[in-house]
């Protein structure tokens, strides 16, 4: 009988955080509860308590994932032996952003097989802006208004002093804004572990979803002509004619690559492995907008990252999801 992995994960996270949710967090520790509270304070909508407090604006699609016929001869991941696997997709804007004219985008996928599921939560950047819970929590907490005003001096100071913030701004400044989800790349950010078929070893790699249509940015003039909400309409019209398609590749870590830091940008040539193709064929409105996506929902043969943000990220998702019920 098929296991309900989402229910098991959610129960585990909610149970784990019942006690911590009722404890007063010390001011210098950013645990999952404090981070969840920061998101709630910063982004919650009193008129809509069930609305997400991070990546709040989004829309949904359905399709399928077609694994490469060769991938299970390279990696020991039984999940990928299936020829076609149902997929639910959610596209979103970063944080509490509400305009499509902004750069931060996300894509979450739930791939539901016969006996297992695989949930992937990605961003349209290769790296993250924070490498640990302290930097992550501080980034959002410093934006909370005090007496109705943000401390712009403090924000400016930290954005210059913290290497992770400064490096991310520099990285992001070189990127444009895409006019369609069919022209966006998405990345795992975290480094996961994959079981090698021959040796049985767990090999570190990140993954990326590369659009079949290619990565394309809008010109300044094209962007100015757009409304604040153009992505969903474009997607809805696109899938009436053809699937929005992405090829998934693993990017294996080189010997000296940092694998426990989501702000570490890998450079140079890397061995890549084609895993399969995601075809998003249907626009399904906002039916998935209240769902939760746990990146720790992994099939056999895929191991969790070791960086300090991964576990706390999953725990915070569980807390905020529970708050919305």
Image (spheres, grey):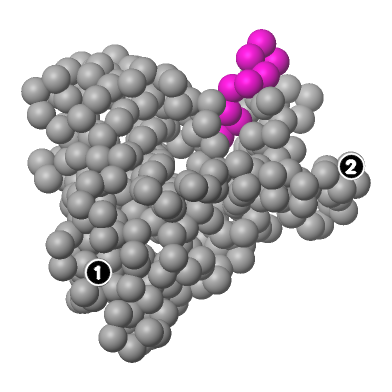
Residue 238's disc number:
none
Question: Where 39 falls versus 215 (above or below)?
Answer: above
Residue beneath disc 1: 72
* Nearer to us in this view, 178 or 53: 53
Q: Position of residue 179 (x, y in %)?
A: 21, 29
Answer with mark 1 or mark 2, whichever residue precedes in sequence. 2
Please report the residue visible at 29 percent of the width from the left and 15 percent of the height from the top. Answer: 227
Q: Is residue 29 left or right of residue 195?
A: right
Instruction: State which region is magenta.
Output: 46-54
Q: Is residue 248 left or right of residue 204?
A: left
Q: Main secondary structure of the magenta part?
A: loop
For the residues labelled 1 and 2, the Cα–Cα distance comes to 46 Å
- Label 1: how many Cα within 10 Å (few below 14, some 14–19, many 20+): some
SS for callout 2? loop
Q: Is residue 278 left or right of residue 26?
A: left
Q: Position of residue 87 (x, y in %)?
A: 32, 39
Residue beneath disc 2: 22
Could you tell me which quadrant the C terminus lies in?
A: top right
Please report the residue visible at 17 percent of the width from the left and 60 percent of the height from the top. Answer: 68
Q: Position of residue 84 (x, y in %)?
A: 23, 47
Please report the residue visible at 29 percent of the width from the left and 73 percent of the height from the top. Answer: 75
Please report the residue visible at 57 percent of the width from the left and 59 percent of the height from the top. Answer: 310
SS for callout 1? helix
Q: Answer whether residue 159 is magenta in the image.
A: no
* Nearer to us in this view, 123 or 219: 123
- Say which of marks 1 and 2 sits in front: 1
Q: Position of residue 10 (x, y in %)?
A: 64, 43
* Nearer to us in this view, 2 or 141: 2
Q: Is residue 212 left or right of residue 312?
A: left
């Amino acid at each position: 009988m098929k296991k309900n992995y989402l229910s098991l994960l959610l129960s585990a996270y909610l149970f784990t955080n019942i006690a911590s949710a009722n404890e007063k967090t010390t001011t210098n520790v950013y645990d999952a509860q404090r981070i969840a509270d920061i998101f709630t304070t910063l982004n919650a909508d009193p008129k809509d308590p069930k609305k997400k407090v991070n990546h709040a604006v989004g829309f949904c699609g359905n399709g399928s994932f077609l694994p490469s016929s060769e991938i299970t001869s390279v990696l020991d991941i039984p999940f990928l032996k299936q020829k076609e696997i149902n997929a639910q997709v959610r596209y979103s804007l970063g944080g509490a952003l509400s305009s499509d004219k902004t750069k931060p985008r996300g894509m979450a996928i739930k791939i539901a097989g016969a006996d297992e599921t695989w949930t992937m939560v990605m961003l349209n950047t290769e790296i993250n802006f924070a490498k640990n819970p302290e930097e992550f929590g501080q980034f959002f907490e410093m934006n909370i208004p005090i007496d109705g005003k943000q401390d712009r001096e403090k924000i400016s100071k930290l954005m210059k002093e913290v290497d992770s913030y400064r490096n991310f701004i520099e990285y992001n400044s070189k990127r444009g804004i895409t006019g369609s989800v069919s022209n966006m790349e998405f990345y795992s950010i975290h480094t996961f572990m994959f079981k090698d078929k021959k040796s049985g070893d767990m090999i570190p790699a990140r993954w990326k979803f590369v659009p079949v249509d290619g990565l394309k940015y809008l010109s300044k003039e094209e962007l100015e002509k757009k409304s604040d909400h153009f992505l969903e309409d474009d997607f809805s019209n696109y899938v009436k004619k053809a699937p929005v398609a992405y090829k998934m590749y693993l990017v294996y870590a080189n010997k000296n690559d940092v694998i426990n830091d989501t702000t570490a940008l890998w450079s140079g040539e890397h061995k890549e492995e084609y895993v399969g193709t995601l075809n998003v064929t249907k626009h399904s409105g906002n039916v998935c907008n209240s769902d939760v996506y746990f990146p720790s929902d992994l099939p056999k043969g895929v191991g969790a990252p070791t960086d300090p943000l991964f576990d706390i990220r999953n725990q915070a998702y569980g807390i905020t999801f529970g708050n919305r019920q």
